[in-house]
Image (cartoon, rainbow, N blue to C red):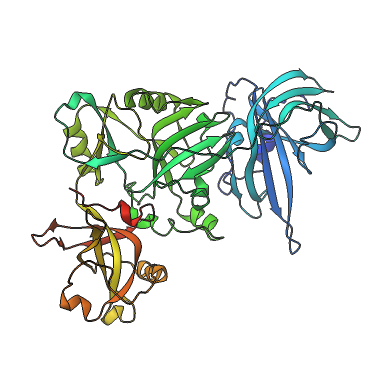
Amino acid sequence: MPTRREDPLAEYRAKRDPERTAEPVPAAGSALPAGNDDTFVVQEHHTPRGRTGERVHWDLRLERDGVLKSWAVPKGPPTEQGANRLAVPTEDHPLEYASFSGEIAAGEYGGGSVTIWDAGRYATEKWDERHIIVTFDGHRLAGRYALFPLNDGAWNIRKLDATPPPEDDEVTAPLPMLATAAALPDDDAAWGYEFKWDGVRAVAAVRRGALTLFSRKGTDITVRYPEVARLPEALTGHDAVVDGEIVAMDAAGRPDFGALQNRMHRTGPEVPKMAAEKPVTYLVFDLLSWDGEDLLDRPYAERRSRLEDLGIAGHRWVATPWFTGGGPGVLAASEENGLEGVVAKRLASPYRPGLRSPDWRKIKNFRTQAVVVGGWRPGQGRRAGTIGSLLVGVPDDEGRLVYVGHVGTGFSDQDLRDLQRMFTARKTPPFEGTLPREVTRDAHWIEPDLVGEVAYAVWTSDNRLRHPAWRGVRDDLEPDDVVVEP
């Protein structure tokens, strides 16, 4: 490898425009971070190749003296003993690059798609101009490896032993703990308070440098939010499971549930473009495990303090604020800032996966209700030929769908187009009991498998929602999850 220059990142910066690339580009003259010289990452890099498709190579990066020493490995690092693979030295990269994955804009240096193939820790046995010997402790790379130069300036990488990589077992995460709707607790000092964020619940599992996002129901939703895949520096080289909320922010920096709607169901080739144009943010509010240590039984106050100490911040990740006691003031602040409300969490409470516990309470500034869509009525005027209103219900204690009203406001034109594609027609109403005549005369019935959320004024005496307005689809909920919110 070349000797260390006065500014080892000068070549890296010269090749990249921070206004055009998503890659981290530290400012010239900034101090190199102190590290332990023990982090490695292998990134799989796909670049366009005209009409013939794409080419792929792997980039091996080893933390050394405050930077990532880097080699491009056209055929990937060997995983079996004895084989030599070409490894071409490239410019030093900043340490932040160890967590980078995502799209590099076309036309920029290295334009294409980068994903993390492996990451973890390594130990140095020897490092000089002619020989580097290290031991990897990764998901795919494990055991002793040698890197050595050839006569033409290129290098080779070879696996020296037969150490097998760890078993490729499935990444899992606990289902999120849920809150009950209630008032502020009387024993204020025994509780912690967080703002309630208007988004989509997600548990993130970080393992060997790769991220998996799970929905409230345990579904893998990683592909929907690629901008979150670039991990903050605090998680580089660590395994962790955290709990949080994916939100889309408006121009004032407040969560906008409506803006999130167009991202919640997307998994196709349009996702990277949408992520670049209107990226989401992952708001983290709990730490469930750290480097194999299970924290579910630890008190909420301890988990929250440890999360705060990590300093998780960077790219599209933010650790949310929390407060010990002072609930009325936190609730007032949430209302003043146009937020949905607060969540009160008992300081001594463990994390109970998948359960709705009284140890967590949600206190809202405005009323919302999850509903099951069972039909629709055609629109008139500007809405002729499409949906005029949705017919919605809530399951009773025996699981029967009870009609609670029709919702005709709060829709964007895109909402109306998307909704009709989600409907499955049926001949009979899915609601229990007799329905109002003005509803049945022109209703179109659908299978009751779509859950949405409405804001409303009040429940009437005949069990109807007064002045409901559509807020969006809740694909993180199943119909049997829906209950009447107190």
Give residue 328's position: percent from left, percent from top.
16, 34
Please give the name of the residue rendered at 86% of the width and 34% of the height, measured from the top-left corner: 153
Q: Of residues 22 and 156, which is closer to you in this image?
A: 156
Q: Is residue 157 left or right of residue 344?
A: right
**Count of labels shown?**
0
Relative vertical location of residue 397 with respect to residue 431 in this rendering, above or below: above
Relative vertical location of residue 23 with respect to residue 38 in this rendering, above or below: below
Give residue 123's position: percent from left, percent from top.
69, 20
Residue 25 in sight: no
Occupied quadrant, residue 258: bottom left
Give residue 316's position: percent from left, percent from top.
46, 42
Please give the name of the residue rendered at 25% of the width and 65% of the height, measured from the top-left corner: 392
Please give the name of the residue rendered at 73% of the width and 49% of the height, measured from the top-left corner: 56
Determine the residue located farthest toward the right in the rendered image. Answer: 151
Determine the residue located farthest toward the front in the rendered image. Answer: 398
Please give the name of the residue rendered at 75% of the width and 27% of the height, measured from the top-left corner: 163
Occupied quadrant, residue 146: top right
Q: Is residue 407 left or right of residue 229?
A: left
Relative vertical location of residue 58 with respect to residue 421 in this rendering, above or below: above
**Quadrant assignment for the N terminus:** top right
Occupied quadrant, residue 445: bottom left
Q: Of residues 205 and 157, which is closer to you in this image?
A: 205
